[in-house]
Amino acid sequence: MTLNFFLREMTHLRYFVPIVMEGNSRGLQSIFYVTPSNKYNCPILHRLSLEKVCNELNIIMKDANDIVGANGIIFTSEESGIEFIKKNTTAKKVTLCYQTDYTLSYRNYVDIVDHIVMPSESVARFYGLTSDKNLYTGIPKYDTDIKKDFVMKRYSLDPHKNKVLFMWPKSRDLHKMPIDIIKNFNELGWQVIVKTRGKDSLHPKTIEDLIESGNKCFSDASWYPHTTQELLEVCDLVVNSGSTTIEECVMHEVPLINFDIKPATRHGRTNKHRVTYSFLYDYDFCVNLKGLDSSFSTAKLNAMLQHFLRTDFTESFKKCKQEWLYDHKNSCKNLLDVLTS
């Protein structure tokens, strides 16, 4: 049996590679069927990084068109490559849910694939996306083992400072985000790590100003393990703006300050769930704010931070995982046990 992966975006590696590694432990050959996305995360653009992963894990690379004749199991992410995969009549077809894209795309592929790997049954019920095709085996990317010492050295981080991961908002929301809170963290001696995405890149002058103030700035420095997950392993706190990074905060057990600035209407339509994964924000490891009023000061931030540093949120994270996600660490084993039985 072969494990076949349709790869159009490098960001999908965080989901695919842990499955490949589990497959390797079972003596199963993995094949990546590669096609360009013409986006910042295009596998052709990042060919050298992709080849490095494939060489290390004995992954064969083929053209995406060849997936039509593949045997075994085909994995993809959401509806990526469905136009290719639906032509295959022999392999078992499995799609992996990517963040919360499935809230909009699920119905585009549910009739084409054999299985859909959902975050959990609770989440499927919340969004009204239950189906006999759903598998609730966990999210493969959290099987990744990340070493803190390695991350500290890789990103040249200060081991003596508390660290906050500041998730830079979409350009659309930037005017509502109190960016100046970074200066308050600076005044308190915290190391601020700004994380952006290729499609929401910073202006060079902004990067220059942030670095001159002693902050760190990263985009997608590593596709696997992914930069965000690596940085979460060494940070004490996250500053977020309603993004699906909340899922990663929960799974890596990092508390957060969240600025609730997401618009109700996006791309010309009003979404039923303005903030996806809103239920993950309703725990005490998260402080939700609309913004910062005029009385906000570094002293007030310090009081908030002392609360985070003094509080053990272990039970809250455990409860959140059990209610909405999962608390085991063997998702890929569970998944392949089901698919190969």
Image (cartoon, grey):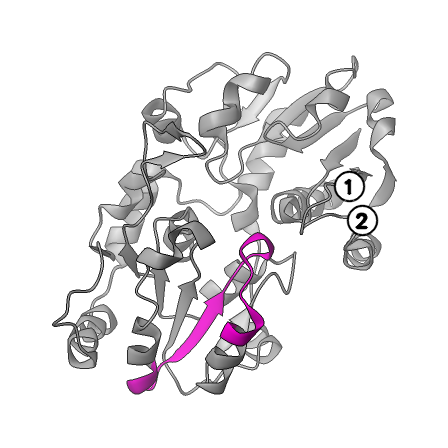
The location of residue 105, given as percent across then percent down, is 52, 25
The location of residue 289, given as percent across then percent down, is 21, 56
For label 2, the crowd category at 10 Å Cα-Cα, with few meaning under 14, some 14 to 19 and many 20 or more, is some
Residue 187 falls within the magenta-colored stretch: yes
Whether tag 1 and tag 2 are in contact, CB under 8 A, the answer is: yes
Q: Quadrant of residue 257?
A: bottom left
The location of residue 275, given as percent across then percent down, is 33, 40
Image-based side of 313 in relation to 329, left or right? left
Assign a secondary structure to mark 1.
Answer: loop
The residue nearer to you, when weighing 243 against 208, is 208
Residue drawn at 86 percent across, 43 percent down: 60
Disc ID at residue 44? 2
Provide the residue designation for mark 1. 36
Looking at marks 1 and 2 on the same chain, the residue that comes earlier in the sequence is marked by 1
Specify whether residue 170 is in view.
no
Residue drawn at 22 percent across, 49 percent down: 283
In whole angstroms, how far apart are the C-alphas of marks 1 and 2? 6 Å
Q: Quadrant of residue 61?
A: top right
Which contiguous range is marked in magenta?
186-206
Q: Quadrant of the N terminus?
A: top right
The location of residue 49, given as percent across then percent down, is 77, 59
Specify whether residue 29 is in view.
yes
Residue at the extreme left: 295
The residue nearer to you, when weighing 114 against 129, is 129
